[in-house]
């Protein structure tokens, strides 16, 4: 009787290595943080486990994914390509894992969201407990900064972004529009006087807000009586890269700022100016990778975020 071989590759077959989902998640976190130690702390794993997972990937793939230096861990060219392929693979596995779950069932898992600093320290964080109370099995990780986040590199599921969408590689779900106003500090107005119209702006100062290094200098924007957006270049003595410093610079008397009306209402002390020159509202969007259908936990989070914005007198757009 002939022998039968079970679970063996046929002669001449090439064995294909399939990385584990856990190894991929560890690699993505190390790449995002640029540190094995920080990744281990964030994942609550021993550092040796994290290092071994990446070394296992590199050995089995036959490619160097990360370049280790004394100060930082950086992606190699192969590592960058591999990272971009990892994210959709893990998204697909997550979707398969919940394939047969009821669409009205409880949410679970983890949602990693990038949020502007002002929004994270304002209404969104203040009302996050009620969202988590509705979904007690869901974990939300908030990463707050005003700069444009690298979604893939930082391992984010989605980002909330204020302003025009410039990254065509990301899908966009409009959440609402943020009404803005013009403000100055009492000290600034005491020294420089109050502007009464656009013609006065040439003798005033503007706090230059540039959250991203490649952004150009800020300009004063307003809608005229015909509804057209007018952009007025102004002098500036200080440039800042986040909303907290923007507000602080104005309070220090360094110039005019244009900020959300809701933010100004939460932190009184600034004086509204030029009410007849209102800035155009700033769009608020939820961005996520084009390649994926938004998972239910992201859609539910987006609906809740729109609900929060509505409570702040935002103009809210339709849901998914």
Image (spheres, rainbow, N blue to C red):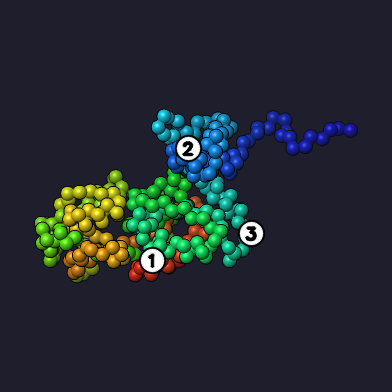
Is there a contact, CB below 8 Å, between mark 2 and mark 1?
no
Residue at the spot x=20%, y=65% of the render? 271
Q: Considering only vertical position in the picture, is 293 above or below 196?
A: above
Q: Name the residue under label 2.
A: 37
Query: Which quarter of the rendered picture does the N terminus lie within?
Result: top right
Q: How crowded is mark 2: few (under 14 residues within 10 Å), some or many (20 or more)?
A: some
Q: Is residue 213 visible from the viewing direction of this image?
A: yes
Reading the chain from its start, which is encountered first: label 2 or label 3? Answer: 2
Residue at the spot x=65%, y=33% of the render? 15
Give x and y (percent) for residue 239: 23, 48
State the separation of the CA atoms marked 1 and 3. Answer: 32 Å
Q: Is residue 162 left or right of residue 217?
A: right
Q: Is residue 75 left or right of residue 19?
A: left
Q: Name the residue under label 3.
A: 100
Residue at the spot x=29%, y=66% of the render? 265
Give x and y (percent) for residue 111: 50, 54
Q: Considering only vertical position in the picture, is 117 above or below 40?
A: below
Q: Name the residue under label 1.
A: 309
Q: Residues within 10 Å of mark 3 (few under 14, many from 20)?
A: few
Observer-nearest residue: 61 or 156?
Answer: 156
Q: How crowded is mark 1: few (under 14 residues within 10 Å), some or many (20 or more)?
A: many
């Amino acid at each position: 009787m002939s022998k039968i071989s079970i679970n063996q590759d046929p002669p001449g077959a090439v064995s294909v290595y399939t990385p584990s989902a856990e190894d991929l998640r560890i690699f993505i976190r190390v790449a995002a943080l640029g540190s094995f130690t920080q990744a281990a702390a964030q994942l609550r794993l021993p550092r040796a486990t994290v290092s071994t997972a990446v070394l296992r990937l590199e050995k089995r793939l036959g490619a160097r994914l990360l370049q280790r230096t004394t100060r930082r861990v950086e992606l190699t060219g192969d590592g960058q390509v591999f990272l971009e392929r990892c994210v959709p693979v893990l998204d697909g596995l997550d979707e398969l894992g919940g394939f047969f779950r009821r669409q009205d069932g409880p949410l679970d898992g983890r949602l990693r969201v990038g949020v502007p600093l002002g929004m994270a320290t304002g209404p969104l964080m203040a009302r996050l407990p009620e969202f988590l109370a509705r979904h007690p099995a869901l974990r939300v990780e908030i990463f707050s900064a005003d700069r444009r986040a690298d979604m893939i590199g930082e391992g984010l599921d989605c980002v909330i972004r204020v302003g025009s969408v410039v990254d065509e590689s990301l899908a966009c779900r409009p959440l609402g529009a943020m009404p803005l106003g013009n403000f100055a500090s009492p000290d600034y107005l005491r020294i420089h006087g109050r502007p009464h119209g656009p013609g006065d702006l040439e003798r005033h100062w503007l706090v230059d807000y540039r959250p991203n290094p490649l952004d150009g200098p800020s300009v004063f924007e307003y809608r005229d009586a015909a509804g057209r957006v007018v952009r007025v270049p102004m002098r500036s003595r200080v440039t800042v890269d986040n909303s907290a410093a923007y507000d602080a610079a104005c309070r220090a008397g360094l110039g005019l700022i244009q900020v959300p009306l809701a933010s100004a209402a939460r932190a009184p002390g600034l004086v509204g100016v030029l009410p007849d020159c209102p800035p155009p509202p700033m769009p608020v969007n939820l961005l996520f990778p084009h390649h994926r259908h938004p998972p239910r936990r992201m859609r539910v989070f987006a609906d809740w975020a729109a609900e929060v914005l509505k409570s702040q007198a935002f103009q809210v757009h339709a849901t998914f």
